[in-house]
Amino acid sequence: MKITKTLLPAIVAMAPFFFSCQQQTDVVESGTYQGTIQKVEPAKTEIYVKTDDNKVLELYFTENTTLTHNGETVPFDHLKQGGKVEVEVEKTGQRLDPKAVRILE
């Protein structure tokens, strides 16, 4: 009984870590892909995009990433879960660097 009382808070505290690790992502070749935003992480300037061929791309914006909508540069907060985007990525090892993100709708 005492072990359970000791372990339970530790398990509860670690739950967010385990759930965050469940996001399965894919590494694709450099190129341009269209898809839907599954998740937006403003604090990390990161998005997860599910492509039209069911790949999930984890994209961390860099200072070189361009974000546009209707040809105009827009801030990161224009990205919304469920939004359609076109992403141009460059594969660097097992990481994808987003070069350009275009909001389609």
Image (tube, helix red, strand yellow):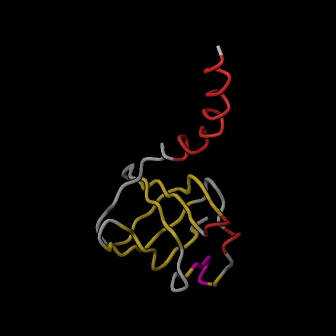
Seen from this angle, which residue lies furthest front?
2
* Image quarter in which the N terminus is found: top right
In terms of depth relative to the viewer, which is nearer, 81 or 21?
Answer: 21
Left or right, residue 43 beside residue 86: right
| Residue in view at x 60 percent, y 37 percent | 15
Residue 87 position within the rendered picture, expressed as x and y whole percent measured from the top left: 46, 70
| Residue in view at x 65 percent, y 66 percent | 79
Predominant secondary structure, magenta span: strand
Residue 45 position within the rendered picture, expressed as x and y whole percent measured from the top left: 61, 69
Residue 69 position within the rendered picture, expressed as x and y whole percent measured from the top left: 62, 76
Residue 70 position within the rendered picture, expressed as x and y whole percent measured from the top left: 61, 78
* Image quarter in which the C terminus is found: bottom right
- Residue 30, by quadrant, is bottom left
In terms of depth relative to the viewer, which is nearer, 29 or 51?
Answer: 29
The magenta region covers: 67-71
| Residue in view at x 67 percent, y 79 percent | 74
Q: Is residue 76 magenta?
A: no
In terms of depth relative to the viewer, which is nearer, 14 or 58?
Answer: 14
Q: Is residue 9 above or below residue 2?
A: below
Left or right, residue 85 beside residue 77: left
- Residue 83, by quadrant, is bottom right
In terms of depth relative to the viewer, which is nearer, 11 or 100?
Answer: 11
Labels in figure, total? 0
Left or right, residue 70 beside residue 21: right
Q: Is residue 11 above or below residue 57?
A: above
| Residue in view at x 32 percent, y 74 percent | 92
